[in-house]
Amino acid sequence: EVTITTGVGTATNSGAMTLATAAGGVSGNSGSVSMKSGAGGTAGNSGSMELATGASSNGATGSMSISTGDAASGGAGGAISILVGDGTLGTGGAMTLPPGKT
């Protein structure tokens, strides 16, 4: 088990965390980032993954952005793909994108 946590803010802010690869050189590519859970065993399930902002008791919650970088001249913008897996018993997984309440 690996846990990475920034400092706890008891009276002020907690620390920020950035997970990034460095920029590529003049003729190079930047590194890729992959986050995934491992496959389940023959009789088990794979692990879950959550990407979420924290709740707020007095103030706004954090924003979340999923984006690809802009392409320079002669390049195409990157694609964003969200895929729900197939099921072998019943239907595949569900996808919901409900808006927040006001």
Image: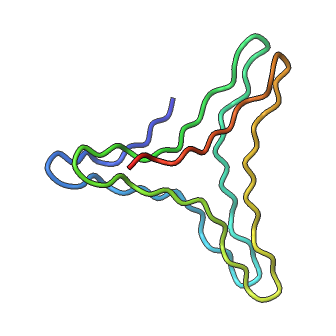
Q: Is residue 25 above or below residue 7?
A: below
Q: 37 and 25: which one is in front?
A: 37
Tell me the residue at 72%/21% (across/down).
40
Extreme bottom residue here? 73
Extreme left residue here? 11
Residue 67 quadrant: bottom right
Where residue 21 appears, as percent x and y from the top left, is: 60, 63
Which colour scheme appears in the figure? Answer: rainbow
Where residue 3 appears, as percent x and y from the top left, is: 45, 36
Residue 15 quadrant: bottom left
Query: How many numbered marks are there?
Result: 0
Extreme top residue here? 43
Q: 34 and 97: which one is in front?
A: 97
Extreme right residue here? 88
Tell me the residue at 54%/60% (across/down).
65
Q: 60 and 3: which one is in front?
A: 60
Q: 21 and 58: which one is in front?
A: 58
Where residue 24 appears, as percent x and y from the top left, is: 68, 75
Tell me the residue at 42%/55% (across/down).
17
Q: In this view, does 75 lie above or below 35?
A: below
Where residue 4 appears, as percent x and y from the top left, is: 43, 42
Residue 64 lies left or right of residue 54; in this view the side is: right
Residue 20 lies left or right of residue 31; in this view the side is: left
Tell me the residue at 18%/54% (across/down).
12
Residue 47 lies left or right of residue 64; in this view the side is: right
